[in-house]
Image (cartoon, grey):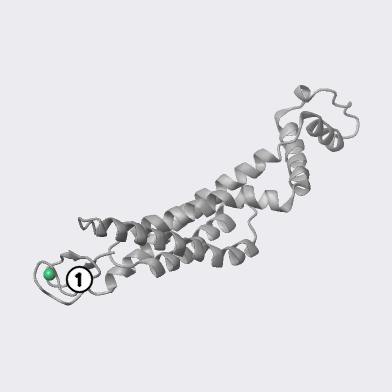
Amino acid sequence: MAWKCYSCGNANPNDADVCQKCGGTVAAPKSFYVVWIFGGAIAFFLVYLAGTLAGGVLVEAAAMPRDEQILAEANTLRKEGVPEFKNINTLKPEEKAAAKAIAVSKEKAKMNFICKGVLFWILPVLLFILGGLMVGFMSDGKTIIEAGIGSLVGQAGAFALHFFVLDTGLEWMVLLVGLVPGFGLAFFGAWLGETIQDWKERRGGITG
Ligand SMILES: [Zn+2]
């Protein structure tokens, strides 16, 4: 969280009024920080995508039906004239896949709303704090708001990919409900990153 001198580029601690190298008092222009909105957007885009995909896998794993359930669904789907399936191993791969998909969605529907939410969102939440922390820590200057704005852009981008390309069944509500806490988490992470950076600088040695 140092400020960069406009004349010589030296990084100065925040409590220094003049540049420690050349005595300049002008900080480098703010435009530098815009970079971190883009940097943040890319970071949070990746984090949101990875987190929600992994969350989907976690929910899927938790909703894994037992063989008997898959077999039961396969028998419900069974065409007329086909003898009853007695063993899951006699199913053709596509029959098994179709039966499993139905069984999984039924299990998902039965799952506790909170349990499902926690499984799905725990990774994105942790990754968002981590992402904010990295933006706050890696960047010169205070980039807390930048990380937050970046998170909004990144979330919207990753959601668009989910919605239009991956077809993973995320709903618009998910994006809308997630934007504010997502912003908050990125903000919190960045604040934490700045605080750690500050603490490191105070212990000596300017890293920024
Ligand atoms: Zn200077």
Look at the image and tell me in which quarter the C terminus lies: bottom left
Q: Assign a secondary structure to mark 1.
A: loop
Q: Residues within 10 Å of mark 1 (few under 14, many from 20)?
A: few
Looking at the picture, tell me which residue is in the foreground, 150 or 169: 150
- Residue positioned most to the right: 81
Q: Is mark 1 within 8 Å of ligand 1?
A: no
Q: Residue 15, position in %: x, y? A: 24, 70
Q: Residue 199, position in %: x, y? A: 31, 58
Q: Quadrant of residue 73?
A: top right
Q: Quadrant of residue 39?
A: bottom left
At 87% from the left and 28% from the top, the residue drawn is 82
Image vertical order of residue 138 relative to residue 150, above or below: above
Q: Is residue 128 visible?
A: yes
Horizontal placement of 79 versus 101: left or right?
right
Look at the image and tell me in which quarter the N terminus lies: bottom left
Image vertical order of residue 48 relative to residue 24, above or below: above
Q: Which residue is mark 1?
A: 16
- Residue positioned most to the front: 203
Looking at the picture, tell me which residue is in the foreground, 194 or 132: 194
User: Identity of the amino acid at label 1?
Assistant: Ala
At 53% from the left and 54% from the top, the residue drawn is 125
Horizontal placement of 134 versus 126: left or right?
left
Looking at the picture, tell me which residue is in the foreground, 155 or 202: 202
Q: Residue 103, position in %: x, y? A: 77, 39
Q: Quadrant of residue 150?
A: bottom left
Horizontal placement of 163 versus 28: left or right?
right
